[in-house]
């Protein structure tokens, strides 16, 4: 990775210990984000997206065991002392949570809540904090006087704007947006996305955006990573992944949205039968093979890796390999 | 890009005080709008004033048993507005004097039990693992401890006094509060803004004081108003069992005395009703104040009322 790499995740695995044994939620994920870069992480519910987001700041419950490395500005988040970790939280990397409705404390004014990280991380006077809260509110398109409002006095979109203002409060170098537009209507969704995009590029902040909505990510982000059953199955430039996906799962995801104005997609919507696999009981070989429309014989035994698929794209599917590679894979990479 | 800014020429300490004064003024303004709360406050202040001024309103001689001012068990008259008790003392004077004991016990026992209960409850709800387990097992142990037995034991060790009663009530009353507060803390801690507070880099103290405490405050206040009543009544039980200071009058003690002489069957309403009404009024006043404070602290509730 280059010098400007803000976040580098290397072979990260997260396993939850539950009553019935160990449940792997994330299985060996690697990626990197440079300053000012926008990476989108897409996948179905339960594929490990939100676990990834929380793992970045070690916010997972104690029952989760993490292995691998999460390098934030060169420091491994998993090895950090408690004090250093608290300093990194928000001042280094902040999170825009899904559901702004509940991520705001109902009994505090929003100005107080936006100023909260400032008081925690910097020595600010009250007037200084007030001034910055005013600036932040203006940046996210809310009038300064709304600082005195309580969360229930704002609309859903306004609350999400408050969450974005809060994420910017301590000038972080990375923002993790976990489904920032869920539960918002389409118009507001577009506004919020534009807002995030412009603020991030304005401040040169790295963005990790997580969503199940591939079209949203393809619009906003430079690069896309598709997750399935705790693994990245395809990674590459947004438009490339969205319009000409290599992995059958990415293909299914991108055709799952009907194209407006195209009657063919309405009459014959894409999509995928079946449910994502139970993380506690994953299929052998490629985890996607039971649902895969173009599965091959040896898909149930070969564990695919992220192989180069041309145009700066990598995909974890034997289809991306040449015929020679396929036979190679089938002989060397037997079931783990 | 200029936000409205407070003039920051003075020292930080003065700024802090100015901010506190401002929020106190705001609090009072909100509180004043609640008519019930104002009524409760006035009643409470009247009782407190009575208790403080009791030595001047009622002469010490008026409570003498050996040289009572009137004949025993007389109905209301010009001299004794609320009649006399079994020793011939004025019931009104007894109630005025008794407010001292009852209010003292009510305040302190409640203060002790609520403080302990709230602090331990929040800690037990916030921390997981062995800290929570230890706190809750200690709580359970105190929960099953009968306050009367503890009172008897304490009286034997510390001697019979008001302090003994306050300690006995305070020590046995906090576990219920702790359990309630812990349950509420668990509910609050499951909300996403607690996760956000952790993500903000907030430590345990930050999360507990800034996010959990304000959200469990309504339940603490409700518990406080209930506890005052319980404490006043428990004091009367202790007084009845002879664990209190026998030389002082209290509301509970007066009711017990009235019960002893069969005031109910003898229709001596002036003996048994006034101390009961006094207890009810104080508890009601506390409840009204508690509700008003809750309304100020919880912006959602405030909106609904106005």
Image: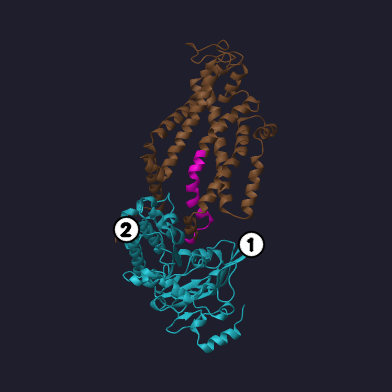
Q: Is residue B232 magenta?
A: no
Host chain of mark 2: A
* Image position, residue A302 (x, y; %): 58, 80
Q: Chain drawn cyan, letter?
A: A
- Kindly identify the residue that appears in the image at 43 percent across and 78 percent down: A245
CB within 8 Å, label 1 to label 2: no
Q: Residue furthest bottom?
A: A324
Q: Quadrant of the C terminus of chain A?
A: bottom right
1 and 2 marks on the same chain: yes
What range is drawn magenta here?
B199-222
Q: Establish if B125 lies above or below A226.
A: above
* Image position, residue B244 (x, y; %): 63, 27
Host chain of mark 1: A
Q: Chain drawn brown, letter?
A: B
For residue B132, which numbered disc appears in the image? Answer: none
- Kindly identify the residue that appears in the image at 56 percent across and 30 percent down: B232
Q: Residues within 10 Å of mark 2 (few under 14, many from 20)?
A: some
* Image position, residue A59 (x, y; %): 52, 63
Q: Please tell me whether mark 1 or mark 2 is closer to you in this view.
A: 1
Which quadrant holds residue A280?
A: bottom right
Q: Residue furthest front?
A: A267
Q: Would you say the magenta stretch is mainly helix, strand or loop? A: helix
Mark 1 highlights which residue?
A: A20
For residue A142, which numbered disc appears in the image? Answer: 2
């Amino acid at each position: 990775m280059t010098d400007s790499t803000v976040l580098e995740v290397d072979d990260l695995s997260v396993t939850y210990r539950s009553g019935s044994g160990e449940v792997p939620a994330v299985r060996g994920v690697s990626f990197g984000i440079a300053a000012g870069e926008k990476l989108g992480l897409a996948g179905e519910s339960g594929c490990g997206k939100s676990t990834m987001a929380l793992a970045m700041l070690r916010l997972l419950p104690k029952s989760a065991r993490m292995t691998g490395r999460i390098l934030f500005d060169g420091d491994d988040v998993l090895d950090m002392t408690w004090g250093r970790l608290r300093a990194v939280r928000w001042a280094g990397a902040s999170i825009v949570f899904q559901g702004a409705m509940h991520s705001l404390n109902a009994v505090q004014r929003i100005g107080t809540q936006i100023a909260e990280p400032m008081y925690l991380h910097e020595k600010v006077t009250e007037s200084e904090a007030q001034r910055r809260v005013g600036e932040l509110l203006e940046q996210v398109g809310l009038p300064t006087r709304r600082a005195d409002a309580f969360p229930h006095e704002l609309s859903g979109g306004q609350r999400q704007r408050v969450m974005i203002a809060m994420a910017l409060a301590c000038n972080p170098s990375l923002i993790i947006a976990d489904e920032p537009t869920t539960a918002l209507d389409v118009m507001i969704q577009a506004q919020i996305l534009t807002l995030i995009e412009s603020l991030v590029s304005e401040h040169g902040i790295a963005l990790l955006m997580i969503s199940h909505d591939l079209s949203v990510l393809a619009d906003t982000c430079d690069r896309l990573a598709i997750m399935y059953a705790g693994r990245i199955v395809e990674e590459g430039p947004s438009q490339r992944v969205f319009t000409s996906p290599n992995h059958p799962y990415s293909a299914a995801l991108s055709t799952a949205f009907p194209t407006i104005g195209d009657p063919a997609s309405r009459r014959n919507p894409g999509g995928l039968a079946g449910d994502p696999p139970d993380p506690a009981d994953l299929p052998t070989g490629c985890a996607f093979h039971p649902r895969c429309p173009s599965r091959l014989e040896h898909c149930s035994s070969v564990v695919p890796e992220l192989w180069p698929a041309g145009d700066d794209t990598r995909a974890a599917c034997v289809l991306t390999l040449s015929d020679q590679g396929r036979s190679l894979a089938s002989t060397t990479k037997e079931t783990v | 890009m200029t936000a409205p800014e407070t003039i920051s020429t003075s020292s930080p300490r003065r700024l802090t005080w100015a901010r506190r004064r401002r929020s106190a003024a705001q609090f009072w303004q909100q509180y004043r709008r609640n008519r019930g709360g104002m009524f409760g406050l006035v009643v409470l202040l009247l009782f407190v004033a009575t208790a403080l001024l009791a030595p001047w309103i009622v002469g010490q001689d008026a409570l003498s048993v050996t040289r009572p001012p009137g004949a025993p068990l007389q109905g209301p008259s010009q001299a004794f507005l609320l009649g006399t008790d079994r020793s011939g003392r004025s019931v009104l004077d007894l109630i005025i004097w008794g407010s001292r004991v009852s209010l003292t016990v009510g305040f302190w026992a409640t203060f002790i039990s609520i403080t302990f209960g709230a602090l331990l409850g929040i800690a037990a709800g916030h921390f997981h693992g062995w800290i929570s387990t230890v706190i809750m097992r200690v709580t359970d142990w105190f929960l099953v401890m009968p306050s009367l037995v503890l009172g008897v034991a304490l009286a034997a060790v510390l001697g019979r006094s008001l302090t003994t009663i306050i300690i006995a009530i305070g020590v046995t009353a906090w576990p219920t509060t702790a359990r309630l507060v812990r349950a509420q803390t668990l509910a609050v801690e499951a909300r996403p803004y607690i996760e956000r507070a952790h993500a903000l880099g907030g430590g345990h103290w930050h999360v507990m004081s800034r996010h959990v405490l304000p959200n469990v405050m309504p339940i603490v206040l409700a518990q406080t108003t209930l506890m005052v009543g319980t404490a006043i009544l428990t004091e009367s039980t202790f007084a009845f069992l002879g664990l209190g200071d026998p030389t002082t009058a209290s509301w509970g003690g007066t009711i017990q005395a009235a019960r002893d002489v069969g005031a109910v069957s003898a229709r001596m309403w002036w003996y048994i009703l006034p101390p009961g009404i006094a207890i009810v009024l104080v508890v009601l006043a506390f409840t009204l104040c508690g509700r008003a404070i809750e309304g100020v602290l919880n912006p959602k509730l405030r909106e609904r009322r106005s």
